[in-house]
Amino acid sequence: MKFKLFKPLFFGICTLLGMNSCTAKVNESEETDKNTNTEMNSDTKSSESAMNEDSKKLVVFFSHTGENYNVGYIEKGNTHIIADMIADATDADIFEIVPEKEYPKDDYNECIEIAKTELRSDARPAVKGDVNVEDYDVIFLGYPNWWGNPPMCVYTFIEKHDWNGKTVIPFITHEGSGMGGTDRKIAEACKGAKTLTGKGLAIQGKVAQENQSSARKSVERWLDGLDMNK
Ligand SMILES: Cc1cc2nc3c(=O)[nH]c(=O)nc-3n(C[C@H](O)[C@H](O)[C@H](O)COP(=O)(O)O)c2cc1C
């Protein structure tokens, strides 16, 4: 389905769900959520010790391919592009969260409907495969902004693991809502971890998809700020 046809439906659903934030900054091309890199929290200090060359790093992400908001049909998801950049820059291992029942690729409305049902029912859709998060020190956790939440399969993944003592660094792609408070939800879900709320990365999906040199610069600047480049 073309974006033109999909757009009213998308915003309609946002309104229905009372999630107007997705329309708020939809035309912004600047990718960094202004709230994201400014709020430091008490986790920051302790996380610094995890950010050394010896720490074992893992990038875990979910990303949707096929018909996607504002970018048409894509073969590689927006968050996936950013995940690869982070893994390259930090020499991290990488793992993709793939739901057993994948979201429809050709019919965006259907994808939206499924996502909405899952969100409303607080579902935990089964995911394929796994990675042993317990073997790592630092986990970059990436996902798209779906109405101010990570897709529910991200919670399925999180709840399979023991996050005690880990440092979790959220990153997100979006079309206007930025991090949207999802880092706080991740912090709550990753029990026992030090989640860098307020220090995650938010990049507009269209920028990730269509302006990769700009996206890469944002990733590198952000990693420099965290002192995480290899
Ligand atoms: C179900 C659904 C809900 C979405 N809700 C929002 C939203 O509330 N705010 C926003 O900025 N973008 C929203 N988007 C757009 C995605 O966050 C954006 O396109 C993202 O870059 C997709 O990344 P991906 O290709 O890795 O899945 C939504 C997309 C979908 C499919």
Image (spheres, helix red, strand yellow):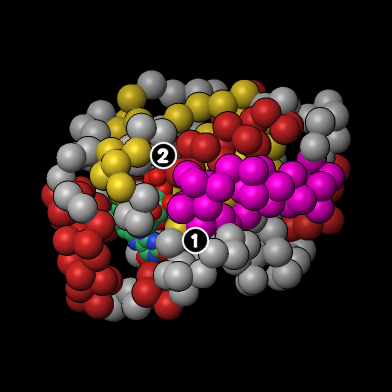
Cβ of mark 2 under 8 Å from ligand 1: the answer is yes
Residue density around tag 2, few if under 14, some if 14–19, many if 20 or more, within 10 Å:
many
State whether residue 209 is above or below residue 44.
above
Residue 216 falls within the magenta-colored stretch: yes
Q: Whole-Å distance between the Cαs marked 2 and 1?
A: 19 Å
- Residue at the disc numbered 2: 77
Given the image, on which type of amino acid does mark 2 rest?
Gly
Q: Where is residue 162, by image quadrant?
A: top right
Q: Quadrant of the C terminus?
A: top right
Q: Is residue 205 left or right of residue 128?
A: right
Q: Position of residue 183 (x, y in %)?
A: 55, 59
Residue lying at 38% horizontally and 21% vertically, measured from the top left = 129
Residue 187 in sight in this render: no
Q: Position of residue 172 (x, y in %)?
A: 52, 52
Q: Position of residue 56 (x, y in %)?
A: 73, 27
Q: Is residue 27 left or right of residue 138?
A: left
Marks 2 and 1, the one that precedes in the sequence:
2
Given the image, on which type of amino acid does mark 1 rest?
Thr
Secondary structure under badge 1?
A: helix
Q: Are marks 2 and 1 in contact (CB under 8 Å)?
A: no
- Residue at the disc numbered 1: 182
Provide the residue span drawn in magenta.
201-228
